[in-house]
Image (cartoon, rainbow, N blue to C red):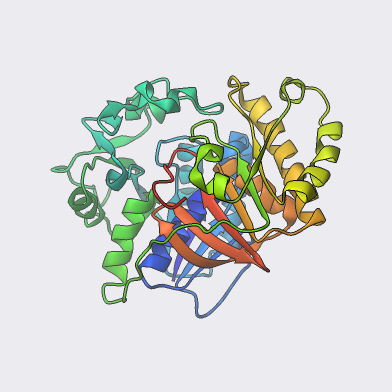
Amino acid sequence: MITVIADDITGAAEIAGTAWSHGLKAILSTDANQQNDNTDVLVIATDTRSGSKIDAINETLRLARQIENNGGILFKKTDSALRGHIIAELNALCEATAYSRVLLLPQNPSKGRTINNGTYFVNGKPLAETAFKDDPEFPATSSSVMDLLGGCVNILTLTGKLSQNGKGIYVAEASTHYDVSTQLNKADKQTLFAGGADLFKSLLEKSYPHKKQRIAGGIIVPCKNSIIVCGSTQSEDITRREFAKKSKTYNEAIPDDVFAGAPADNWLSSLPDIYIRHKSIALTISNKENGGPQCALRLRKIMAEAVKRLVDTNQPELLIIEGGATAYSIIKELRWNNLELKTEYRPGIVSMTHGKTEIVMKPGSYPWGNIL
């Protein structure tokens, strides 16, 4: 079995979707004690990216102790754009396990994200010149991998070797799927795998070469009762899509005064009536300025409370959530701790179910494509 620890829930969903596409049985859970003898891949979702560094370390150590008897391979899912407390969590895992070194390959060449000559690129543009420079919690102020990770890593070039006696974290350069596989094959059993979905896919291809793969695809069908939460500052406005028009989705933006710090009670109390009247509702932040990490945390809590009130009013057939930290806050508020994977619409955009509700999660920085 492969056990995955993810630092946010949309990343966990992406990994579970990758396992599903490879023909494997995957469980996504916020509970590390979830066990199933028939499971090929257990994906544990956390929200360590959005917490403090010390909290991330403590949570990582706690999970490592809980899963130490799982056996098999451990994979640490990190943000593909190097946001979060990556080095602290990887060091904690090495401290708590028998792994002596880390192969870190966060970038996903399949989505135009590459690392070359120690520099991170998104579709050929340096990371610090993309929308990631405006991330409210981990703004990309540099495109240098060494700068982004604090200079405490080794760069593993395509022609370089992973020292079998060495320790530390090796960031692997890769610009193609072949490059990813090449870097993966340099690791041994003492090496902890960490990174993005492309590395995980290569790991599955090597570990389960004969599985019959499933094909991702399809479109998200508008439902009579739906809730859409746009919790990312990096995503397009979903309410302008044809999907929103077909479902007659009502757009409810968080009020300016609430965004600025005013109590949200009156706004939250008004939402159930709006939902009953329109049946399909989108909760958005609108085009407001980045308010920083504390503002982002407060908005996530407000959005989670808003969704809880709407679900208590009428559990929807469809719940769409953009943004990993927002999704985690909502799922925890709803106490929907175990989600059954339904399908993968496209890499990174995964559908799960809880009761009668289909839940679609998408990382904020990934495009919807033509599935809406």
Residue drawn at x 34%, y 25% is: 143
Q: Residue furthest bottom?
A: 38
Q: Answer above or below: position of 188 versus 8.
A: below
Q: Is residue 70 or residue 343 the one in the foreground?
A: 343
Q: Is residue 248 or residue 8 the one in the foreground?
A: 248
Q: Answer above or below: position of 171 versus 177.
A: above
Q: Residue furthest left?
A: 159
- Could you tell me residue 138's position as x and y percent? 51, 28
* Drawn side of residue 314 relative to residue 136, left or right: right
- Could you tell me residue 183's position as x and y percent? 23, 50
- Position of the N terminus by quadrant: bottom left
Say if residue 96 shows up in the picture. Answer: no
Residue drawn at x 28%, y 66% is: 205
Where is residue 323, by image quadrant? top right
- Could you tell me residue 224's position as x and y percent? 66, 58
* Drawn side of residue 302 relative to residue 151, left or right: right
Say if residue 210 shows up in the picture. Answer: yes
Residue drawn at x 78%, y 57% is: 314
Q: Answer above or below: position of 4 versus 293.
A: below
Figure label count: 0
Residue drawn at x 42%, y 61% is: 218
- Could you tell me residue 10's position as x and y percent? 52, 49
